Image (cartoon, rainbow, N blue to C red):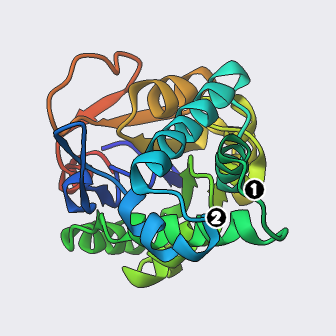
Amino acid sequence: MEKYSAVFFDLFDTLVMFEPSLLPEVTINGEIRNSTAKHVFTQMQSSLGGIEFSDFYTPFVESYTELLDLRKKNLKEYPNRKRFEIFLEKTGIKGDEDLPDRFVRSHMQSLCKAVVYPEHHTEVLSYLKKKGYRLSLVSNFDHAPTVRELLGKFGIANFFEDIVISEEVGWRKPHRKIFESALAGLAESPQNAIFIGDNPEADITGSSEFGIDSVWVNRKEQPGGTEAKFTIKNLRELRDIL
């Protein structure tokens, strides 16, 4: 068993699971898809100027893909508000300064309903705390209040000494600055830390290139993650490592 002093966890699809099938269904061009779009459209209809859902959906999706493209350029994080600023520009919808934030809140409200938490993860976190490890959360997410809401909802916020969210740092994994921020938050050195995540590039490559050992949570036995020091399918297996 390895001995570290700090354990860093990714959030989505590592500690909590995003299940797209739990999102509302919409039918577009005869195809059924799961999306927050219908929820947002219904909640925000009074601000949409009378446009039909068919005219709402395309810019709703395009704003998301454009935001992804912005992030890929240099790994800078843009808040979710930026997505809906793009959406409003595409549709020509006008409103007060708070309008993009109201779209964000509606979108996040729907998104959270598709996040589930495996109860046995609490057992794993409790085990690590009892062993004396210092725990930190390091998440790529563009709306920090939603991350904190989910941690509170699932009752796991108090396990973490520090919570590092890309929206607040301004950079996304695998950029080294978010790992610098995580280490600084606990005043730990890379050799004393281990990172646990599901994404081979963001979590495993990012932490490994910064000199942090990593555990790849590979539930579906996908290829990749070769820089990981350990590979597991279930967080329970951390007991064999830590």
In the drawing, does residue 19 fall left or right of residue 58? left
The one nearer the camera, 215 or 67, is 67
Kindly indicate whether the residue at mark 1 contacts the one at mark 2 (C-beta within 8 angstroms): yes
The one nearer the camera, 239 or 14, is 14
What residue type is disc 1 on? Glu
In the picture, the disc for residue 144 is 2
Residue 196: percent from left, percent from top: 41, 44
Q: Residues within 10 Å of mark 2 (few under 14, many from 20)?
A: some
The one nearer the camera, 4 or 56, is 56
The one nearer the camera, 14 or 180, is 14
Q: Residue at x 35, y 58 (%)?
A: 15
Residue 177 versus residue 181 in the image, above or below = above
In the drawing, does residue 101 fall left or right of residue 193? right
Residue 91: percent from left, percent from top: 65, 46
Q: Residue at x 21, y 67 (%)?
A: 118
Q: Earlier in the sequence, mark 2 or mark 1?
A: 2
Residue 171: percent from left, percent from top: 72, 39
Residue 46: percent from left, percent from top: 58, 76
Q: Is residue 132 visible?
A: no
Q: Is residue 230 visible?
A: yes
The residue at the far right in this view is 97
Q: Secondary structure at mark 1?
A: helix
Residue 133 versus residue 65 in the image, above or below = below
Q: Residue at x 25, y 73 (%)?
A: 123
Q: Secondary structure at mark 2?
A: helix
- The tally of labels here is 2
Q: Residues within 10 Å of mark 1 (few under 14, many from 20)?
A: some
What residue type is disc 2 on? Ala
Q: Which residue was labeled with disc 1?
A: 168
In the drawing, does residue 21 fall left or right of residue 44? left
